[in-house]
Image (cartoon, coloured by chain):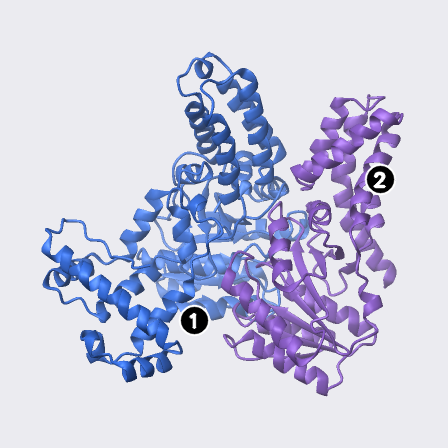
Chain colours: A purple, B blue
Amino acid sequence: MVGKVLDRLRMGLQKTQAGILEGLSRSIKGHRTLDEEVLDEIEATLLQADVGPETTSKIISRIRERGRREKMEGLKAVKKVVKEEILAIMDSAPTADMSHSMSIPRPYVIMVVGVNGTGKTTTAGKLARKFGKEGKKVLLAAADTFRAAATEQLEIWAKRTGADIVRHKSGSDPAAVAFDALSAALSRRTDILIIDTAGRLHTRTNLMEQLKKIKRVLGGLLEGAPHEALLVLDATTGQNAIPQVDYFNQAVGISGIVLSKLDGTAKGGVVIAIRDRLSIPLRMIGIGEGPDDLRDFDPSEFVEALFGG
Amino acid sequence: MFELLSEGLEQVFRKLGKRGKLSESDVRNCLRDIRRVLLEADVNYKVTREFIERVGEKAIGAKVLKSLTPAQQVIKIVYDELTYLMGGSAVGINFSPAPPTVIMLVGLQGGGKTTVAAKLARYFRSKGKSPMLVAVDTRRPAAVEQLRVLGLALDVPVHSPDANTDPIDICTDAVTAARRSGLDLLILDTAGRLHVDQEMMEELVKIRERVRPHEILLVADGMTGQDAVNIAGEFHERLGFDGVILTKLDGDARGGAALSIRTVTGKPIKFVGVGEKVDALEVFHPERMASRILGMGDLPSLVEKAQEAVDIEKAKELEEKLRKETFTFDDFLEQLRQVKRLGPLDQLLDLIPGAGQVLKGLKPDERALIRTEAIINSMTKEERRKPHIIDGSRRKRIAMGSGTSVQEVNSLLKQFSMIQKMARKIGKMKVGRTSRPMFPF
């Protein structure tokens, strides 16, 4: 089982890797030293991976700087430096460790948030599966009362993963669902409560207020709740991911990002810019539609996979 | 929409505007900035490069350098190129001379296909078509249910299959069903799939071969980054499509994907999704989008919107009332509702030239409208006609009834009496042919 999961991750990441590695190999072929042409090609590769102009130019100027001091000859040496510089960004931000804090409060309350269509409900389902397999008692809360049939979708995930579910009628107050779910979690001695919220564009002020209210209600009932607010980000998203994360973070305090749909051709490089500019860590990656296609994120593994050995 | 792209370019142009004449290095600097702006807007790297080259060829040269207003010329060149890149004027849907016309929606997961399906059904019904929605997505949990609920709310028939029905059979059955019921438009909501999923892409090809849809539309997320060219390119190559619907453009996404997809596939963007509500669908106008990108605002859009929402007959009636000084709270409520029909306030502001800059950071309070409506709704019929009878205790009752405060009721009454005064003045003047509702906000 674990082997299969690793294969899927590798498959998912390989597609990411192929893009960047390909570009980089092509660019450096024939060049012995780090000249402006090579730098341009590295820049092109990073930009096409959605790293974005600001963080890309930061990385490029660091590499250029190092090129003046160090001798870089051949593809391998240049790639090593590129990797190191990206890793420096990914590592310089604080990483929260879910499994560490997980042992303390019970129920451990996780809010799943994000813009429309990134895969929040699917991620909530996959999280239920993950914790269920660890022997935890999981409760799902269907707090997306807006999108038609979102509750039904989560219900199917609950059945699939053997988790309990708390739901209200469509159109009801999501904060009330959250309240009921947390009350139920407290009385049923649930280990993990996962709250699936409605997708909302981060620019919709009133909907962001609603999200704050859900958080307030949870905190009022159980001190410290929610313990996590995970933002689900679509790997195909471009630079708009930065304001997305920024606004959601301001509203509810994002503890980490789940990067979904990494099994396509999108490189998800914007997470590097997010780490660089907002210091919000990437926590998990979604690499498929199956219940087990959710993986913990490891920065060095990710960068390693991005740029190859 | 496209706000940040506009903002960035505005900055670039402001820089240019301060100089009398442009040197070649000015143009180069300007182009470097435009490049960065486009990249930040998620315009594909290669598309950006081509764009910059094209603008550069036109801008660096005698024409611009000798010009009296070089900045204006660069703006015009960038604007022309953006319009060109997004492709000509608006393109509609091809309807089959032998109904039913079949529209097939395809795209990645989470792009908004199901929502778009409902929006299209509503849109074309308002144009006199009889649509039917077809739930082909048997894969995503509760996707069929989602479309069924949306159809029910719109009162549009939904062809929903039994579990485990083959997607191709669902589509052919739906065509038969539509023919039998005399419906002339079928909208196929297919399952979201990754463009690299060979098996799933093959399924779409099979549906296309069997059903022969008249329009295949790619539904793409307006927030998509560099990968937009790969996604659209792959769907175009494997399946082929006639146009694109770009969704989620009501946020602050810079929408560079619009430029990228158009450039790479040559297919037009036909509609844009601008909100979660079923009426938040707009016909795509490349030239308007280009002027938005350049921060020139979008007056034509606003005018069209206003015309759609404000009933001309009602406007005439109102004008009459203003003349006769019989403007009441009921009329006021009617106006409010017309304003609301125009769409979310912040979207309206985007359409006003310059408003983006002036009102940056100022979010119009949608709820103020709702509260005002609630206050009026809590008045009796008599109170609405004769606001002067609303005394202290009535104010208290209205505040209680509407869940607001006496202060809010007071301020509304004050606003209203100002409007009445204005109305009297206007009534005494000769009112022209154009009558517009007045927004007291």
Rendered-image quadrant of the C terminus of chain A: top right
The front one of A215 and B267 is: A215
How far apart are labels 1 and 2 at the CA level?
55 Å
The front one of B10 and B284 is: B10
Residue B175, position as x, y percentages in the image: 45, 59
Res. B373 image quadrant: bottom left
Rendered-image quadrant of the N terminus of chain A: bottom right
Which residue is identified by label 2?
A84
| Amino acid type indicated by mark 1 | Leu
Task: Confirm whether circles 1 and 2 share one chain.
Answer: no
- Reply above or below: A12 against A165: above
Q: Chain of mark 1?
A: B
At x 82% / y 49%, what residue is drawn? A91
At x 58% / y 42%, what residue is drawn? B232
| Amino acid type indicated by mark 2 | Glu
Res. A29 image quadrant: top right
User: In the picture provided, is B67 more to the left or to the right than B323?
Assistant: right
The front one of B204 and A286 is: A286
Confirm or deny contact between disc 1 and disc 2 (CB under 8 A): no
Residue A262, position as x, y percentages in the image: 71, 51
Which residue is identified by label 1?
B152
